[in-house]
Image (spheres, rainbow, N blue to C red):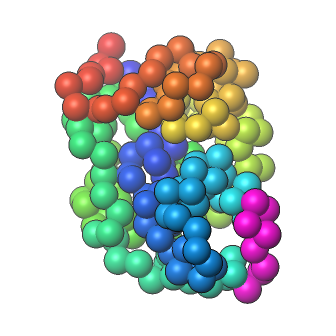
């Protein structure tokens, strides 16, 4: 099975770190849980929701880039899925430097035959272009993400989809935990 993965919130539990950093930068009495909920829609949504200035955004990005890789934890069981797949690819809005910092820290970079990041110039999800590129090159069987924008392009291309820790209507499959799951055929 060839799997297209989202990165943040799908392979690695990055949103708690992002929420903590955003709270520190905003310096307002808003719970990390509430910030987390806004970030799960999208970073762009959270920026608009909290009416953040460019200076806030730049500080959030800088602090995120300065955060050690070990603060970003992989979801339990995800490595077993990566091992069982024929091919794994990533499509993420994160930068290549950030993704590689985390993957290399855990020694997981070898699990992926290709990684498409925001640096590659494709339009942001849910635009289909990056998924179409990866599908044409690697014949993707399943796309896994934690948000609807992660599966919309796959659905448009006729690829099976899986939402992780998200029960919004629209996916072919739903998984709350990777432990014990296998997608090897």
- Residue at position x 68%, y 29% in the image: 152
Does residue 104 sit above or below 179 in this rendering? Answer: below
Q: Is residue 84 left or right of residue 122?
A: left
Query: Which quadrant holds the C terminus?
Result: top left
Q: Residue at x 45, y 33 (%)?
A: 164
Q: Residue most toward the front?
A: 29
Q: Nearer the viewer, residue 64 or 30?
A: 30
Q: In which quarter of the view is residue 137 placed?
A: top right
Whether residue 70 appears in this view of the structure is yes
Q: Is residue 53 magenta?
A: yes
Query: Which residue is pictured at 62% across the width and 78% down the height?
Result: 28
Classify residue 55 by image quadrant: bottom right
Q: Is residue 104 magenta?
A: no
Q: Which x, y percent locates residue 32?
A: 50, 63
Query: From which residue to which does the magenta span run?
Result: 48-55
Q: Is residue 102 left or right of residue 127?
A: left
- Residue 159 in the image: state x and y as whole percent: 59, 19
x and y percent of residue 106 in the render? 25, 60
Pick the quarter of the image with the N terminus: top left
Residue 154 lies, with reference to residue 38, above or below; the image says above
User: Going 75% across and 74% down the picture, which residue do you hit?
Assistant: 52
């Amino acid at each position: 099975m060839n799997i297209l993965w989202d990165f943040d919130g799908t392979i690695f539990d990055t949103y708690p770190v992002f929420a903590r950093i955003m709270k520190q930068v905003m310096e307002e009495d808003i719970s990390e849980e509430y910030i987390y909920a806004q970030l799960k829609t999208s970073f762009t949504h959270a920026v608009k929701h909290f009416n953040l200035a460019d200076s806030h955004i730049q500080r959030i990005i800088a602090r995120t880039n300065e955060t050690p890789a070990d603060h970003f934890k992989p979801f339990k069981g995800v490595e077993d899925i990566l091992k069982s797949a024929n091919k794994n690819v990533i499509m993420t809005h994160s930068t290549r430097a950030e993704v590689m910092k985390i993957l290399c820290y855990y020694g997981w970079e070898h699990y992926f035959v290709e990684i498409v990041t925001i640096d590659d110039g494709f339009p942001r999800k849910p635009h289909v272009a990056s998924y179409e590129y990866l599908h044409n090159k690697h014949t993707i069987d399943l796309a896994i993400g934690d948000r609807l924008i992660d599966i919309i392009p796959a659905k448009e291309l006729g690829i099976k989809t899986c939402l992780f820790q998200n029960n919004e209507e629209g996916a072919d499959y739903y998984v709350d935990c990777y432990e014990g799951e296998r997608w090897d055929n």
